[in-house]
Image (tube, rainbow, N blue to C red):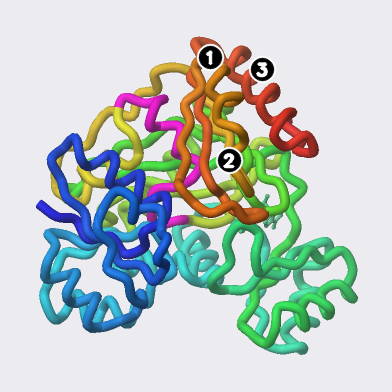
Amino acid sequence: MTIGIVGAGQLGRMLALAGYPLGLDFMFLDPAREAPAGRVAPVVHGSFTDPKLLSWLARECEVLTFDWENVSVEALREHAASVHGARICPPIRALAAAQDRVAEKRLFERLAIPTTRWRAVGSRSQLERALRDVGVPGVLKTRRLGYDGKGQVRVRTPEDAHRGWEELGSVPLIYEEWVPFDCEVSIIGARGTRGATAIYPLNGNVHSEGILRLTRAPYGPPRWQRLAAGYLERCLAHFRYVGVLTIEFFVRNGRLIANEMAPRVHNSGHWTIEGCATSQFENHLRAILGLPLGSTRPVGFSAMVNLIGAIPPRAGLLAREGLHLHDYGKQPRPGRKVGHCTFVAPAAARRDRWARGLLAELAPGVRIP
Ligand code: AMP
């Protein structure tokens, strides 16, 4: 049985690695010659919107899924779904909502999930109005194609906003209030074809310059877990979702405020490979194939530290007892996620000490709450 995956990045690579023990095969579509999944599975090289390639992939594979959400929804609707009737998971409607920060905010509001105050900005006069309605500080973001802090400008004064408007170019934007959060968390869960769900323990995330640096899980009091799981269940049910879905939140005075969602396996869930009975990658595959979902029970207290820019000397990393190294096989480049390390401890305090020690060495500027 072959799974077609649009996007051959590290998420796709880890999906394939989770699928081989289940006897699955994989076929990827990606324009990049050096894509990380290409080391472990065949990749068809071409554009994500190429109608011929999409319909070919849909024909060849049992089910089509994604490691990147910014694929063309129009191309999928036209050339994959209608022509060959291939199953596409997660649903295209969820992809469409996650691609546009305004659609995402409207969805959260419709489902009564607290989110930041925001205004859509398509012109200078709308920017003025957004500044009046939402106030400063805030952040201007491109509605589409932003990731890892790209396509964002912090706004401390109205002048920053006007500068941001010019910097980001004349593309549709969103203006949001800046949330002075206590911490950031995310929740990941899977929904199967018959509506069963499996929700993972809450992740506590530390970002720096918009990039995830550290995830710890399980994290936070049971109340946060209940709130986040409830919000995620609402989204899963709304889309009659199949596969893994993630929501990221700011926590402020005990409230969870949704920032964004990702219709896929997520960087903050990489720890589940070693830290849970069933990884997010395996559960995504189980879900889209209509198989029973696996247990999301944690086997301890996990930390995941991203390796950004370049892989540090391996011997130094592997000399740390209990460290699991994942090298995505990418070329080094500043700001690029090239791998991650995981550690599973019997107690939260020991996990936190490990994470602080490793981050102090790799990224001394990052503050851990
Ligand atoms: P995003 O691309 O929206 O996930 O933003 C990346 C990171 O920037 C977030 O995880 C936060 O650390 C920070 N950030 C984005 N939007 C806001 C906001 N409205 N208030 C405070 N921090 C933010």
Residue 301 visible here: no
Distance, label 1 to label 2, CA atoms, is 18 Å
**Marks 3 and 2: in contact by CB < 8 Å?**
no
Q: Is-magenta flag for residue 274? A: yes
Q: Quadrant of residue 64?
A: bottom left
Q: Is residue 317 visible?
A: yes
**Residue 310, placed above or below residue 100:** above
The CA span between labels 2 and 3 is: 22 Å
Disc number placed over residue 353 in the picture, else none: 3
Q: Secondary structure at mark 1?
A: loop
Q: Which residue is mark 2?
A: 311
User: Which residue position holds label 1?
Assistant: 321
Mark 3 is surrounded, within 10 Å at the Cα level, by few (under 14), some (14 to 19) or many (20 or more) other residues, namely few
- Looking at numbered disc 2 in the image, what kind of residue is underneath it? Ile
Q: Of the two numbered discs 2 and 3 on the same chain, state the one appearing first in sequence.
A: 2
Task: Nearest to the eye among marks 2 and 3: give it.
Answer: 2
Task: Classify residue 123 as left or right of residue 265.
Answer: right
Residue 320: quadrant of the picture:
top right
Instruction: Specify the quadrant of the image occupied by residue 74.
Output: bottom left
Q: At 73% across and 37% down in the image, what residue appears?
A: 363
User: Which badge, 3 or 1, comes first in the chain's sequence?
Assistant: 1
In the image, which residues are magenta?
A: 262-277
